[in-house]
Image: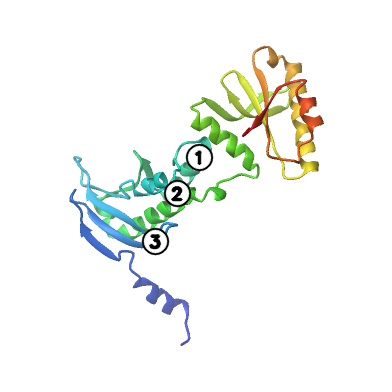
């Protein structure tokens, strides 16, 4: 069988975005979609009329994606990094995240295009559920992510990627500002990279000392105690400007 664009478009048009439909206790319609969460269960979306003066409808996951992540012990908006990823996903797909639910609002004249809303909402649910696959969220410096998760779990108020003006006109990037402390994180997979990172951190502490920040901020270097790549001499050198804290030990 020879396929062309016209034939494929006709075939794909008959692929249903709704595999099952039933009514739940709230009166909403539950639509089972062909999209699946990482554990293999189907993404369900719920359609109901909003209580408002206007004829409006809402298509929502009823918080099922958040529940899926909770079961995986992942809080969807617990860190600045996750909140930013969540915001980006919602903006890209034209959906909202409210009170733990991912949803799309529709006016009566938009109902005819509900398939597009189902597609966007379901795709958002799948992408957000990937938060449970922790490795997909980790940055190049995975240890830095671990430190941020610790700050969040401990209830610390912190600001990531803080920029302060250096003594020579350029900005100095600080990994975290926690209370009255500047925190830089040291970790690397191999010894040359670890030494290079330690040298960069040493330079930052030196320049910040010249600006006088040390009188109002405590300088803290957190290093990976499990990494054999970090030289003890580098830690000793950094201790001249900052408190050195090993993590997780």
In this rendering, does residue 28 appear at all?
Answer: yes
Where residue 81 sits: x, y (%)?
Answer: 53, 39
Which residue corresponds to mark 1? 84
Marks 2 and 1 sit apart, C-alpha to C-alpha, by 12 Å
Which of labels 2 and 1 is toward the front? 2
In this rendering, does residue 113 appear at all?
Answer: no
Q: Which mark is residue 35?
A: 3
Q: Is residue 37 above or below residue 144?
A: below
Say which element carries label 2.
helix
Question: Around disc 3, counting alpha carbons within 10 Å, would you say few (fewer than 14), some (14 to 19), or many (20 or more)?
Answer: some
Q: Earlier in the sequence, mark 2 or mark 1?
A: 1
Q: Is residue 235 left or right of residue 163?
A: right
Question: Around disc 1, counting alpha carbons within 10 Å, would you say few (fewer than 14), some (14 to 19), or many (20 or more)?
Answer: few
Task: Please say which color scheme the image uses.
Answer: rainbow
Question: Around disc 2, counting alpha carbons within 10 Å, would you say few (fewer than 14), some (14 to 19), or many (20 or more)?
Answer: many
Which residue corresponds to mark 2? 128
């Amino acid at each position: 069988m020879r396929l062309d664009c016209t034939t494929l478009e006709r075939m794909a048009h008959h692929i249903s975005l709704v595999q099952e439909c039933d009514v739940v206790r709230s009166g909403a319609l539950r639509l089972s979609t062909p999209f699946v969460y990482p554990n293999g269960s189907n993404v369900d979306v719920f359609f109901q009329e909003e209580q408002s003066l206007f004829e409006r409808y809402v298509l929502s996951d009823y918080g099922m994606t958040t529940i899926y992540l909770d079961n995986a012990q992942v809080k969807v908006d617990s860190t600045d990094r996750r909140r930013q990823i969540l915001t980006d996903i919602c903006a890209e797909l034209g959906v909202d995240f409210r009170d733990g639910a991912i949803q799309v609002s529709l006016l009566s004249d938009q109902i005819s295009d509900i398939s597009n809303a189902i597609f966007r909402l379901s795709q958002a649910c799948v992408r957000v559920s990937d938060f449970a696959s922790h490795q997909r969220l980790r940055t190049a410096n995975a240890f830095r992510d671990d430190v941020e998760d610790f700050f969040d779990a401990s209830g610390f108020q912190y600001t990531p990627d803080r920029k302060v003006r250096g003594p020579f006109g350029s900005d100095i990037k600080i990994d975290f500002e926690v209370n009255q402390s500047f925190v830089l994180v040291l970790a690397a997979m191999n010894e040359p990279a670890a030494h290079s990172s330690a040298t960069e951190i040493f330079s930052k502490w030196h320049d910040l000392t010249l600006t006088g920040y040390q009188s109002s901020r405590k300088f803290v270097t957190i290093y990976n105690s499990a990494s054999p790549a970090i030289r003890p001499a580098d830690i000793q050198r950094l201790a001249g400007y900052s408190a050195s804290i090993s993590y997780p030990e």
